[in-house]
Image (cartoon, rainbow, N blue to C red):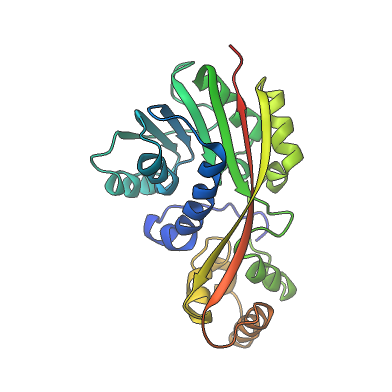
Amino acid sequence: MADEQIRFDDGDAYENFMGRWSRLAGEAFLDWLSPAAHLRWLDVGCGNGAFTQLLVDRCAVREVLGIDPSAEQLAFARARLAGAPVAFRQGDAMALPIPDGTFDAAVMALVIFFVPDPAKGVAEMARAVRPGGGVCAYAWDLAGGGFPYVALHEEMVRLGQQPPGPPHPEAAHLDALRQSWTDAGLVDVETHAIVVERSFDDFEAFWATARQGPGAASPLSELQRADARLLKTRVRERLGAADGRVTITARAHAVRGRKPG
């Protein structure tokens, strides 16, 4: 299971499992970024458009182009942003289907550790923005326990079920982000830690959501019934979840830089 590739193809399932988390972290990210209005944005790995929606709602964008490899996710994104100054195109983060210097800003939201060659993905974003343009990203601090569903994943490991993960979790380290941006020739590079919380009505609501993730669904289906009950009990105890609302804290790392010129 550790070598299984994670794919996000169901826009509805992604919205509940990660889209809401993406917007929470994205709101804090944009607060820190404080971008100018009327920019042309490139949203690399846009998925179902969760962060793209934030750009439209908050940044008075001139236009946004979302790139993602999943046709299903893009269909969801097009429906959610119908009528907005947004276009979507299927494509590869390591070979963006656009000319040099096309955009004012490029962003990866919760994506960089999924890119097979993160450095190439950053270099492509830098290529795609004009001189003086911005390149930025945020991603869960996976190695530091910042993933929203880390409790479930760690308890699965205790039961011998290794959930699949992205190929490069180390790419989200603050030092790694700073180095990747610097290596791409970007200047004025800054990093930032983002902490967000999401509340669920009760543990069952959290559990139903956590089970939807592509990193958990397949391994959970392989558990024997007794092990599945044990897993659920361990996660409930770990979260201190009795009756009432359950609040989960997550942490992401952010980076920004500018293309010289």
Please tell me whether residue 112 is drawn above or below residue 131 in the rendered image. below
Tell me, yes or no, if residue 234 can be seen here. yes
Please tell me which residue lies in front, 200 or 19: 200
Is residue 158 toward the left or the right of residue 235 in the image? right
Is residue 177 toward the left or the right of residue 63 in the image? right
Is residue 199 toward the left or the right of residue 158 in the image? left
Residue lying at the far left of the rendered structure: 83
Is residue 23 toward the left or the right of residue 193 in the image? left
Please tell me which residue lies in front, 187 or 48: 187
Please tell me whether residue 24 is drawn above or below residue 191 in the rendered image. below
Please tell me whether residue 225 is drawn above or below residue 29 in the rendered image. below
> What count of labels does the image hold?
0
Residue at the (74%, 38%) spot, across then down: 176
Residue at the (55%, 76%) spot, across then down: 246
Tell me, yes or no, if residue 211 can be seen here. no
Which part of the image, by quadrant, shows the C terminus?
top right
In the rendered image, residue 23, in percent from the top left (x then y), is placed at 47, 52
In the rendered image, residue 73, in percent from the top left (x then y), is placed at 39, 48
Figure quadrant of residue 125: top right
Which part of the image, by quadrant, shows the N terminus?
bottom right
Residue at the (66%, 54%) spot, across then down: 3
In the rendered image, residue 82, in percent from the top left (x then y), is placed at 25, 43
